[in-house]
């Protein structure tokens, strides 16, 4: 290269290789500001594939945290210190407008400015601060249970070293699912940019439903936890199924691919029937659906779902871990240890660290129930009274952020 040549004179393949070696995705995104050429280069599917392949080869860990319904993100630690995540400002006219998180999948969140009578929905990426508004649903209801799911933006073969084994899904799909009273369903299809209503009650012989959690996305399905008069259950719904028209007008759908399973709590606890003593958390961790039985002030049990075959089967991961076995002796300041045993409440699984669950013990902590250890979560002193513990969502930061596609 001549002395008066600039970095833009480098062959493109070499420039891609240099930028891919930056230590943090934040620096890669800052390079987009260098020039229009660099912005187009870094935004290309070829560059994304190369960057993801390098992260795979380096075995870079996938980061994760959880987000609370009021928009509070638990902090994420990485090599550059503490990463702060915030919801983007949707309206310049009303920048103080409050958004509630009603669903999450990977690094995208579904937000709404109201908890009841939900009409306006936005899909946001809190890392890139990009967002898009959805059209309003066909009907407004005082209360609905909502689930959000999307295809992964990229996929790769972990055993391959070939460049073409990283596949970019530039036309990935979204689904927003609203479970209405009597279990009718509204589904938003990103391919058409339209909502469609169900034409039938999807759940067969069950007559009463009380969905108590938001939808949890896991392996292309949405899961909800609920109960009827007799038992607790887990509902599995496949929003990517081939949905048939119900009445021929194209506006209604028949949703018939759903499955029920009795929650494993119904088969194990010695305090069944005492709802005050139990707290249930549904979440996803490393591609597995998990549910916990949290007996207040006593112990923790965790099950994992094996969704293969025709039935939903549960595997017991941890059986009755007593709280008093969790080690806090490495804290020099005893004021930093969790306080009253009876004040502990499970609030959500960590999405990317196995054997880890968040617990509110008057201070927010991460409990490793395998190693019997805990640590404090930075800058989250305790549960906010406005938190709804059934609506704490897993949030994963992949190697390359998911773009927010226009509708």
Image (cartoon, rainbow, N blue to C red):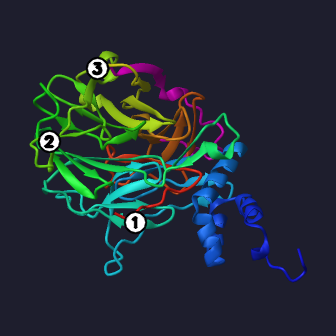
Look at the numbered disc 2 and give the secondary structure of its residue. loop
Q: Answer with the quarter of the image where residue 400 lies.
A: bottom right
Image x and y of residue 406, in percent: 38, 65
**What residue do we see at 55% from left, 42% from top?**
337
Q: Which residue is mark 3?
A: 266
Image x and y of residue 58, in percent: 72, 45
Look at the numbered disc 1 and give the secondary structure of its residue. strand
**What residue do we see at 42% from left, 32% from top?**
289
Q: Nearer the N terminus, badge 3 or badge 2?
A: 2
Q: Which residues are magenta?
A: 311-339
The image's mark for residue 184 is: 2
In the rendered structure, the answer to whether residue 179 lies left or right of residue 330 reads left
Observer-nearest residue: 28 or 224?
28
As measured in the structure, the alpha-carbon distance from the residue carrying label 3 to the one carrying label 1 is: 41 Å
Dot 1 crowding, Cα within 10 Å, few <14, some 14–19, many 20+: many
Q: Which residue is mark 1?
A: 131
Observer-nearest residue: 7 or 327?
7
């Amino acid at each position: 290269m001549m002395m008066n040549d600039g970095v833009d004179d480098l062959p493109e393949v070499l420039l891609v290789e240099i930028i891919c070696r930056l230590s943090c995705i934040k620096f890669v995104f800052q390079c987009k500001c260098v020039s229009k050429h660099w912005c187009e280069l870094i935004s290309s599917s070829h560059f994304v594939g190369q960057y993801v392949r390098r992260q795979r080869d380096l075995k870079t860990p996938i980061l994760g945290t959880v987000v609370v319904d009021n928009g509070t993100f638990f902090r994420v630690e990485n090599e550059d210190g503490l990463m702060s995540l915030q919801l983007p400002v949707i309206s310049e006219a009303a920048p103080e407008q409050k958004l509630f998180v009603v669903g999450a999948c990977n690094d995208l969140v579904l937000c709404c400015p109201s908890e009841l009578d939900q009409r306006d929905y936005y899909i946001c990426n809190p890392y890139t601060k990009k967002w898009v508004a959805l059209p309003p649903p066909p009907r407004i209801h005082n209360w609905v249970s909502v689930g959000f799911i999307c295809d992964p933006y990229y996929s790769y073969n972990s055993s391959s070293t070939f460049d073409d084994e990283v596949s970019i899904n530039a036309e990935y799909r979204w689904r927003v699912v609203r479970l209405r009273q009597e279990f009718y369903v509204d589904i938003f299809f990103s391919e058409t940019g339209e909502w469609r209503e169900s034409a039938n009650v999807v759940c067969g012989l069950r007559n009463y439903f009380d969905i108590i959690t938001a939808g949890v996305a896991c392996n292309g399905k949405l899961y909800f936890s609920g109960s009827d008069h007799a038992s607790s259950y887990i509902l599995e719904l496949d929003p990517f199924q081939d949905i048939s028209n119900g009445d021929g007008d194209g506006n209604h759908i028949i949703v018939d691919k759903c499955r029920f399973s009795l929650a494993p709590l119904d088969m194990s606890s010695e305090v069944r029937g005492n709802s005050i003593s139990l707290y249930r958390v549904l979440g996803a961790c490393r591609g597995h659906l998990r549910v916990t039985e949290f007996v207040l002030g006593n112990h923790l049990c965790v099950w994992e779902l094996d969704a293969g075959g025709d039935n939903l089967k549960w595997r017991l991961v941890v059986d009755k871990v007593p709280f008093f076995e969790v080690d806090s002796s490495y804290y020099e300041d005893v004021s930093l240890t969790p306080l009253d045993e009876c004040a502990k409440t499970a609030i959500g699984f960590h999405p990317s660290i196995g054997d880890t669950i968040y617990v509110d013990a008057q201070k927010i902590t991460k409990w490793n129930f395998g190693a019997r250890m805990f640590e404090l979560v930075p800058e989250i002193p305790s549960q906010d009274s406005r938190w709804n513990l059934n609506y704490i969502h897993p949030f994963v930061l992949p190697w390359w952020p998911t773009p927010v596609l226009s509708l």
